Image (cartoon, helix red, strand yellow):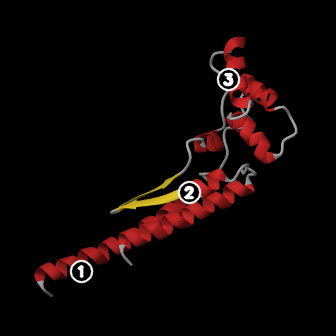
Amino acid sequence: MALDNILREELQKLALDFIKKYNELGLKASGEWEREIEVEIKGYNGSIKGLDYSKYMVNGRGANKDNSEESIRGWAVGMGTEGGAIYEWAKAKGVDINPVAIAYKIAREGTKAYNDGGTDLIDSVLTEERIDEIQTKAGNELVVDFIERFKEVWQW
């Protein structure tokens, strides 16, 4: 199997495992994150791309650095009213608490995930063993590819 196919296959497996863990952790709200995750392969380089807010699902969000009432109110109202991320999250989750109140609490205290040191969304899926497995598969293909190309050049 060609190296780019190995990368695609392995990254697609990782993406599916990230989605599975995301669901296990109860992070799903609208399902947009799950729908938008994508694998991108360019030559022998690959990546898994997600939405910008992925970092908050992994690390959580700390309290506002500017603790002034004006700053907290501005953030909470912006995020907790229609069109804001917390409003949309609460709506998708079916949360029966005022989203502005949730946003105020986050602005003052940070999220539970942040205060707990983040989630294991990435670390539980992208383990050292998994990395070694991917490197072994990719490395073996590189050796086979190198030998085949060497033989072509030297016409064995």
Give the alpha-carbon distance from disc 1 to disc 2, as whole Å: 31 Å
Name the residue rendered at 86%, 35% in the picture.
97
Q: Is residue 68 visible?
A: no
Above or below for 134 versus 57: below
Residue 92 position, x and y percent, is: 76, 46
Left or right placement of residue 35 versus residue 143 in this view? right
Give the alpha-carbon distance from disc 2 to disc 3, as whole Å: 33 Å
Give the residue number, with chain letter if any, for mark 2. Answer: 126
Residue 151 position, x and y percent, is: 18, 82
Quadrant placement of the C terminus: bottom left
In the foreground, 94 or 115? 94
Name the residue rendered at 43%, 66% in the picture.
7
Above or below for 104 versus 125: above
Left or right placement of residue 10 versus residue 85 in this view? left
In the foreground, 28 or 121? 28
Q: Earlier in the sequence, mark 2 or mark 3?
A: 3
Residue 1, quarter of the rendered image: bottom left
Cβ atoms at labels 1 and 2 below 8 Å apart: no
Above or below for 20 versus 105: below
Q: Residue 148 carries which label?
A: 1
> Which amino acid is tagged 1?
Glu
Q: Residue furthest right?
A: 96
Give the alpha-carbon distance from disc 3 to disc 1, as whole Å: 59 Å
Left or right placement of residue 63 versus residue 123 in this view? right
> Which amino acid is tagged 3?
Trp
Residue 90, quarter of the rendered image: top right
Q: Which mark is residue 75?
A: 3
